[in-house]
Amino acid sequence: MTWQELAQQQGLEVAVINKRNLQAKRFDAEYYRPSILALERQLQTKTCTPLSSCVKVSDGNHMEVSRYFTEDKDGIPYFRGGDVNDFFLENADPNRIPTDIYEKGVMKRSHFFPEDVLLSIVGTVGSVSMMTDGIGKATGSCKIAILRSENKRRARYIAAFLLSRYGQAQIERNTRGAVQMGLILDDMDKILVALPSGLLENAIHDIIGSAIIMNRQARAAYGEAEKMILDAIGLNKYDNENDAVSIRSLSDAVTSNRFDAEYWQLKYDVVLKRIAAYKGGVSTVGEQFTLIKNNFKPDAGKIYRYIEIGDVSTSNGEVGYTEHSMDELPANAKIEFGERQLIASKVRPNRGAVAILNDHRGYVGSGAFTVLKENGQVPLEVLMVYLKTEPIRDLLLRYNVGTSYPVIRDDDVLNLPMSLLNEKDTAEIVKNVITAHKNLMEAKALIDRAKRAVEVFVEKDEKAALKVIEDV
């Protein structure tokens, strides 16, 4: 039996490379995978230019800035590699730094400007975002490559190309490292970009522009829902009590079984009093919703879609998943999801990892979620917005237990008080949440069309690519 027959019998991917075609310092099999080489051959049927010739390439800030991070909403957004996980950078929830730190001379090289393409080069390598004029001033870490084109209409095409399978395959091929994988700036000249005429570039520029508008409309609709809840409860603008001393009776501490100073901060009293004072009535999460817990019974031989905390977007509630066989499932796979449920992270609840599952029957989730379904007069959409508001996220920190891995418990969520909004406000909030989700899905569909148009251009021609964009 020849080695070719053996490889075929075993289902092995094998590439035969002439030693003259070996790249310097790259002898790893992954670099020469047949599937990637096939995409590269297809790409070479077009006129290609190195990425570093299409854009000015730099990376973000190398200065240690974590000690400057501030809760001040007027601070300058500081994005890290993990924040570049959504094409729409406006959807990220970055840290912030004071303006005077942002203006430091050493930081100016890492300032972001509208139409910059941001590429994550460490950790979540290959994620792409666009900097838009809706963000204002911003900067980021050295784990982000800043790709800046002098041709502003070309910038969005570059972003779509990098998102395409031809861009992603080259990024994957040139990623290197042992402990921490990454893409170095010197390798940007090895990533080839197939450049079309201005006609396709303009069409992709415009469709991505429409996607950016749709995403902003989604954010506006969700923001209106959140504002309605906070206005109704009286928490839209409230003065946090920051007094360093809070005097409590021993009986209160014993009843709550909490003797730590953090639990008794006065700012929590402000939130709870506003909720209790709502004239329309007050209930609890546990009275309005039913808890789903530890109902998963694994089935041998089945492939499961597993959702963990990191799969839930804290910005827009989108939910991803990974696939695992029963033997590969994490030990914390505890819950099998059904129709129309809400999941909320019990780990770092102040991050707002909360989402509604509408079509996830049979998916499996981490036991680090509180999972709820409706049984009262409050819809899941209202609960989701409520749990993601800043005052309630802050309040949930009160119930943290543990030191090295602080979490809250299901009972803390179930005992959380919530105001019972009137039918009109409830209906309007639900409408806004549904509108926000619809607009977000449409925005992402437009990005997918731009990405697909690039792939069709590489595989066929520009006329076929334009048809992808024009067909609705």
Image: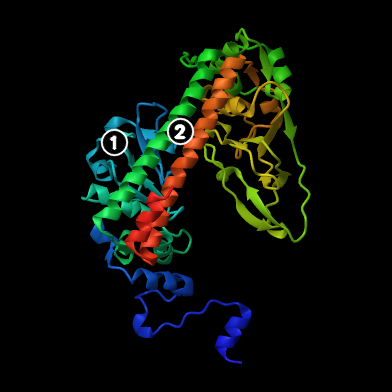
Residue at image coords 55%, 86%? 4
Q: Position of residue 188 (x, y in %)?
A: 31, 61
* Quadrant (top left, top right, bottom left, bottom right) of the N terminus: bottom right
Query: Does residue 57 show up?
Result: no
Element at label 2: helix
Q: Is residue 53 left or right of residue 453?
A: left
Reading the image, the residue beneath label 1 is 102
The crowd level at tag 2 (other Cα within 10 Å; few <14, some 14-19, many 20+) is many
Q: Residue 412: which quarter of the image?
A: top right
Judge by depth and name the residue closer to the eye, 33 or 121: 33
Query: Does residue 453 show up?
Result: yes
Q: Is residue 178 left or right of residue 399?
A: left
Say above or below: 118 vs 252: below
Say above or below: 73 vs 331: above
Say above or below: 354 vs 231: below
Judge by depth and name the residue closer to the eye, 428 or 21: 428
Residue flagged by tag 1: what amino acid is it? Tyr
Residue flagged by tag 2: what amino acid is it? Ala
Tell me the tag on residue 218.
2
The crowd level at tag 1 (other Cα within 10 Å; few <14, some 14-19, many 20+) is many
Q: Position of residue 75 (x, y in %)?
A: 35, 29
Q: Position of residue 456 (x, y in %)?
A: 40, 61
Element at label 1: helix
